[in-house]
Each structure stands twice: as C-alpha cells, then as structure tokens.
Amino acid sequence: MSSPFAVAWQQRLVEGFPLLAAMGVTVQGTAEHWQLHAPFAPNRNDHGTAFGASISSLATIAGWMAVNVWADMPVDVVIQHGSTDFVRPLQSDLRAQVALVSPEAILKLNGTLARGRPARLAVEVTVTAVDDPAMTAAQFAGRYVAVRL
C-alpha cells in the first residue's frame, strides 16, 4: 500500500513530467524515507542494459523532488548544474536514493527562501538496482535553485 506522500508525489511527477510516465517512474516510501523506482524494460538500451539517459533523468528528478520536499514553503525548483558518473551497467529495475544533506544546509535553504531570495542546494543521488541496493550503477551530483512562490 502506498503512503499519501507517495501517492501525491506520484501524481505530481507524472502530470508535470510526461517523460516520467513513459519511464514508469514510481515514488516509494514516506516523507521521511522515500526513493524513486523505474522498471528496467522501458528504460533499457540496445546493449540490454539500463539507458544512460534514463539513469540520469531518474537521478535528476530525485534531486529536484528532494529540494521541493526539504523546502518549508511552496517553491519553484530548477536544476542549475548536474553531473552523472556511470559506475557499472545495470540489467534490472532502477532505484534512485537521495543522500541526506546537513540540517544546516536545509536551514540555510529555508532561511534564504524566507527572505525572498533564490536559494541553491547541492544534492547527491545514487542509482542502484532495486533488488540489490549495494550495486551502484551511477552517482549523480546536482545543484538546484529554488525560488519561493
């Protein structure tokens, strides 16, 4: 059974980003501990491994979602810079997990937003196999900009 958090974010993602619906991306978990999943079949390439653009897209949207979740107010978030390091090929369903940032970084994010200024936040995401979270396929580092709505 999906949590209300996962249901709400699932709807927001597939309505706001049609590509994610085509990728089969789903939100799993609760506000305190969540991750994004994508099935292998629609995200494979001609080599029989996970498509690099699918991996990068999944990681990018996980970082975007994290900034939205960590903001204490409604915000508009865009990516400013992103880089994906592909570690090993993946031949199974994908899982994107955002690394926690420090409480100080979240306080700074929200303090800057409260003053009506754009806030930047660096986010790291690991993409692994759903059935083997120790099997890292890619590491993503992104910098996002949030603006208070």
Image: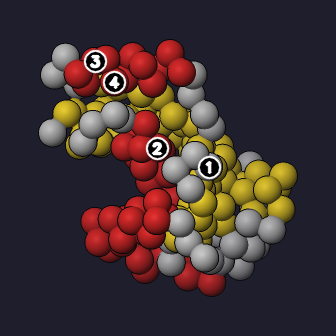
Q: Quadrant of the N terminus?
A: bottom right
Marks 4 and 1, the one that precedes in the sequence: 1
Disc 3: which residue: 112
Residue shown at 55% from the left, 82% from the top:
42
Q: How far across and down, in percent of the image, does residue 14 sit? A: 36, 72
Element at label 4: helix
Residue in front for this viewpoint, 48 or 104? 104
- Give the left or right position of residue 8, taking residue 141 as reference: left
Q: How far across and down, in percent of the image, does residue 35 sit? A: 59, 56
- Distance Cα–Cα, label 3 vs label 2: 17 Å
Question: How packed is label 2: few (under 14 Cα within 10 Å), some, or many (20 or more)?
Answer: many
- Distance Cα–Cα, label 3 vs label 1: 25 Å
Disc 2: which residue: 66
Q: Amino acid at mark 2?
A: Ala
Whether label 1 touches label 2, CB < 8 Å = no
Marks 1 and 2, the one that precedes in the sequence: 1
Disc 4: which residue: 110
Discs 1/2, front? 1
Element at label 3: helix
Q: Which mark is residue 44?
A: none
Q: Amino acid at mark 1?
A: His
Q: Which mark is residue 33?
A: 1
Whether label 3 touches label 2, CB < 8 Å = no
Marks 2 and 4, the one that precedes in the sequence: 2
Question: How packed is label 3: few (under 14 Cα within 10 Å), some, or many (20 or more)?
Answer: some
Residue in front for this viewpoint, 7 or 105? 7
Q: Amino acid at mark 3?
A: Thr
- Distance Cα–Cα, label 4 vs label 3: 5 Å
